[in-house]
Amino acid sequence: MPTQLSTELLHRLRRAHQRKPLTWWEQTYLPSIALGLWITSTHFWRNLFLHIAHRVGAFRDIPASVTIQYPEQQREMSPRLRTRHRLMQRDDGTPRCVACMLCETVCPAKCIYITPAEHPDPNIEKVAKSFDLDLGKCVYCGYCVEVCPEDAIRMDTQRHDIAATSRDGMWLDIIELLHPGSKKPSDPPQKFVQLSLDDFRRLKSSPETTD
Amino acid sequence: MWTDLLIKLALAGIVLFAVLNLAGIQTWLERKQSALMQDRVGANRAVFYLPWRWAAPINWVLRKLGGVGLLHALADVIKLLTKEDFIPSSGAPFLFTLAPWISVFFALVAFAAIPFGDSLQLFGRTVDLQVAHIDPALLYVLALASLGVYGVILAGMGSGTNLSALGGLRAASQMLAYEIALGVSLIGVVVWFGTLDLQELIRQQGTYLFGWIPQWGVVVQPVGCLVFMTAALAETKRVPFDLPEGEPEIIGYFVEYSGMKFGLFFLTDFVETVLVAALTTVIFFGGWQVPYLGPHGFAFPWGGAIELSRLTVVLLGVGAFTLKVSFFIWLFMAIRWTLPRFRYDQLMALGWKGLFPISLANIGLTSLLRVLVH
C-alpha cells in the first residue's frame, strides 16, 4: 500500500515533463533580464571593490577572483596526482631498479627503454645501467608504477609543466630520472646514457644534481 | 567667419577625441568588466619597458598600467596593424576596402548632432556645445545610423564568399527590422516635447513635472525608452543581437577581413555603442541636465539655492553628460556579458511582433495624453 509520500512523489514525476506556462509578465522576459543583470552586476561591483581594496592592502583574505595566476602561483596538488616520473635510489645513490623489464613490458605507449647490467652484489639480481623515458610518448597511465616490484619508479615529482622545443627535448635519461630537475631546458638532449655503479655514487655526491 | 570655422573645428576635434577614446577604452572595459562579472582577473600581462636608466619612473607607471591591463589596447593595435591585409580575389576589392570605412564614417559623423553641453559665453560669443546645430537633428542621427547598414552589406557582398554574403543579409534584415522600432519609439518623445532639435529637446527636459520631478524622457516615456534601448542595442550588432557577426560559430559579414580593416569594424561597434549611449542620454535622460541645476546655479524645490557662475554650470552639465554616457556604456556592456544570443526567429519576432506594435501603441497613448494634459 503506497504511502502519502510515495504517491506525492509519483505525482510529481508524472508532472515533471510538463512545463509551467509562463505568465504574461514573465513572457516579457524583463524580470529575468533584470535578475540576470542584478546577479552579474553584484559580482562586478563586489569584485571591483575587492580589487581596489587589495591594492591598498585591505580585505586581503577575501579573494576577488578565482583565477590562479599560473607561473607565479601554482595550484595545490594532491600527492596522489600522477606527475612526472622519477627513479628511486638506494642509500648509496645507485638505482633501486633491478632491470626486471616489467615496466618496459607493461607500458602501453612503449616509452621506457632499459639496458640491464650485472650487479656485483649477489643479493641483487641486476641493475639498470641506462633507463630512458620518452615523455613525448608517455600517456601517464601509471602502470609502470603499479607493476614495479621494487618500488623503483614513482610518479610523484609534482612536475607537470613539461615543455620542450623538440621531440628529443622530451627525452629523460637516467640522470634526470634519478635526480629530477638536474637537467636544464637548454641542455642538449642525451639518449641512452649508460652509467656504472660508481658513476651513480659520484652523481649522488656531486653538487649539481643534489637539490 | 574664420573664427566660426575654427570654433566648429575645435568642437569637432573635442567630440572626435572623446568618442574615439571612449571607443578605445571599451576594448579595455570589455575585457575587464567581463572578467570582474565572471570572477576572473582579466587582461593584466601586456607591458613593455624603456631600456634606459632615467626611464625608471616611466617604467613604474608602465608596470602599473600593464597591471590593470590598459596596455593591451596598444598590443591590439600593433597586432592589427602588422597582420596581413588580406583581400579575397573572388570579391570586389574596391567595395571590400570601402565597406569598413563607410561603417566607421557614418557612425562617427552621427555625433555631429549630439549636443554635449549648454551654450557657452566665451569672449562675447555664444558657443553652442554641439558640432552642427541642425533643426531636425534627430532625423539626421537616425538617417546616419541607418546608412551604416551599407557598410555591412558591402562587406558581405564584396567578400565574394557565400558565408559573408549570408551574414550581410542577416545584418541588413536585422538592422532594417530594428530601425523601424527605433524610429517609431522616438515619435512618442517627439510628440511629447514637440521638437526634433536635440538641444531644444534637452532644454525642455530641464522643466519639472509637479514642480519637482525632472521631466526627463524616461519619466514621460518609460515604454518608449525601453523599446528604444532594446532596438538601439540591436543596431550596435553586439550580443544579444550579434547575429550579423556571430564570431564563434555562424560567422558573419566580416569573415574575410583581417588586420586593421577588421579593426575598423570592431571600432564601429564600439563607436555605435557610444552613439547609442549618447542618444539614450540625450533623448531619455536629460542630456547635460543636472536635476535642479538652472542657468544660475542650483535651485532646490524644497527651498535653498546655490549660486554658481555660468561657466561652472556649463562644465557641470558637460560632466553630467559624460557621466551619463559612461553609465550607459557600462550598462550596455553588462547586458552584453549577461544575456545569451537570440535565435534568428526570436530576433525577428521580437522586432516585428514585439517592439513595433508596442511603440505604435505608445504613440497612440502619448498623443492622447498630450492632448489631455495640454
Image (cartoon, coloured by chain):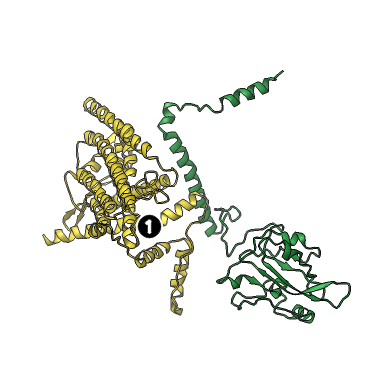
Chain colours: A green, B yellow
Q: Position of residue A98 (x, y in %)?
A: 80, 70
Q: Nearer the viewer, residue B285 or A111?
A: A111
* Disc 1, SS: helix
The residue marked by circle 1 belongs to what chain? Answer: B
Q: Which residue is mark 1?
A: B25
Residue in the image at 45% along x and 77% along y: B51
Q: Nearer the viewer, residue A26 or B56?
A: A26
Residue in the image at 28% along x and 39% along y: B177
Q: Is residue B22 visible?
A: no
Image quarter (top left, top right, bottom left or bottom right) of the N terminus of chain A: top right
Q: Is residue B343 visible?
A: yes
- Callout 1 crowding tier (Cα within 10 Å): few <14, some 14–19, many ≥20: some
Q: Position of residue A115 (x, y in %)?
A: 74, 74
Image position of B91 (left or right of B39)? left
Question: In the displayed image of the protein, which residue is found farthest to the top?
Answer: A1
Question: In the displayed image of the protein, which residue is found farthest to the right?
Answer: A122
Residue in the image at 32% along x and 36% along y: B351
Q: Nearer the viewer, residue B60 or A195?
A: A195
